[in-house]
Amino acid sequence: MKRKSILPWLNSMVAGVMMGASITAMASGNHAFVPMGLADAVGVIDLESYQMTATIPDTINTHGSALTPDGKYLVAGSLTPRDTEENVSRPEGMTEDEHAAHHGGSGKAPADEQSTGLLYVVDTTTHSIVRKLEVPSPVHHVLVTADGRYAVSTHPMGGGISIVSLNSGQVVATVATGPAPNYVTETEDGQSLLVSNTGNGTVSEIDTQNWFVERNMRIGGSLGHMVLSPDNDRLYVNDDSAGRVVALDLSTGTVAGEYTVGKAPHGVGLSPEGQTLYATSQGDDRLVRITLDDGTRQSIDLPPAPYHLAVAPTDGRLLVTSSEESKLWVIDPITLNIQHDIPLNGIGHQISLAPR
């Protein structure tokens, strides 16, 4: 069943503002958005000038980020527990009294709700926060579903994920997946989400029509970032404890192969056609490229501590941050040469790029 993409409350935020198609394209299509953690801001990188041209301020310790399919909005998640005295948007259809009652009668969360988290919805043209949404726990990584309806957050302290309607602003479901859920991705048909659970070495497959776990696939190790092949047959998952990327066959739920990366692998990505795997090794200060059809492995020194990684969907350029220095590298996918070294204001986390 295909879901309609509707964001009426977002549209109302910008009603009356004239934005041409070219301006909208510039807002996201030629830019990368990089949450900068404890710098309490999101950096905006111009991929033509290769400079950080703007920052989105007033966010707290943002790690996760994802763009809506049209690129008009960025959803960023805070890994710091929410300030219980900070105002958040009241869900559509909920009265002020009901909202206050949900927070203990005074708008302040009671003791057992101190670990709630925040999502920031940012207009990518104005770089302003247009809405703050409360979620059950601090947020690690974020996904916006391909139909634009939902923001999905992983909650490492909460043992699961939350699904927020971008139409109403309400949490429509929470799903327990396993200890320390880390990363989330979506199958092309939108019928399933895949979540890596660092704490028990499993990947949970979640039905998006009914929001329940269909199966848990056991890999072992300490699982983190993931990337799905274009044909949706294989899921490539970083295993930090074993220094490898594991290929999971989704038809059988079994391990189909593994690739050595190095100490403390973190970021992982695929070339646009899905034939080349890239991964970062923080512990060895290396970026690794693996040709999947024959297993050929190449790597370069990339100190210090290459961290998050994103692959540009148009030309395959690699964007890599460091976990020890405030910088982002732009790397040629063929030669692995560093093309640009871009200063940031903080440590860069989940990089968001506009889809093709």
Image (cartoon, rainbow, N blue to C red):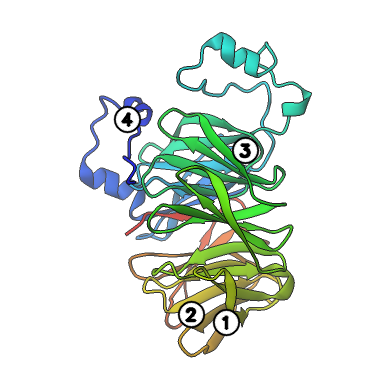
Q: Which residue is at 50% across, 36% downward?
A: 164
Mark 3 or mark 4, which is nearer the start of the sequence? 4
Q: Is residue 114 left or right of residue 245?
A: right
Mark 2 or mark 3, which is nearer the start of the sequence? 3
Give the numbered dot on residue 11: 4
Q: Which residue is mark 2?
A: 336
Q: Which residue is mark 3?
A: 60
Q: Are marks 4 and 2 in contact (CB under 8 Å)?
A: no
Mark 2 or mark 1, which is nearer the start of the sequence? 1
The kind of residue tagged 4 is Asn
| Residue 71 image point, x, y percent | 35, 47
> How many neighbours does mark 2 have within 10 angstroms: few (below 14), some (14-19), or many (20 or more)?
some
Q: CA distance from mark 3 to mark 2?
A: 34 Å
Q: Are marks 4 and 3 in contact (CB under 8 Å)?
A: no
Mark 2 or mark 4, which is nearer the start of the sequence? 4
> How many neighbours does mark 3 have within 10 angstroms: few (below 14), some (14-19), or many (20 or more)?
many
Q: Are marks 1 and 2 in contact (CB under 8 Å)?
A: yes
| Residue 190 image point, x, y percent | 40, 52
Q: Secondary structure at mark 4?
A: helix
Whether residue 320 appears in this view of the structure is no
Query: Quick one: quadrant of the C terminus?
Result: bottom left
The kind of residue tagged 3 is Ile
The kind of residue tagged 1 is Ile
Foreground: disc 4 or disc 3: 4
| Residue 78 image point, x, y percent | 61, 40
The kind of residue tagged 2 is Leu
Q: Which residue is mark 1?
A: 300
Nearer to me, 275 or 20: 275
Q: Secondary structure at mark 1?
A: strand
Work out whether 135 lies above or below 86.
below
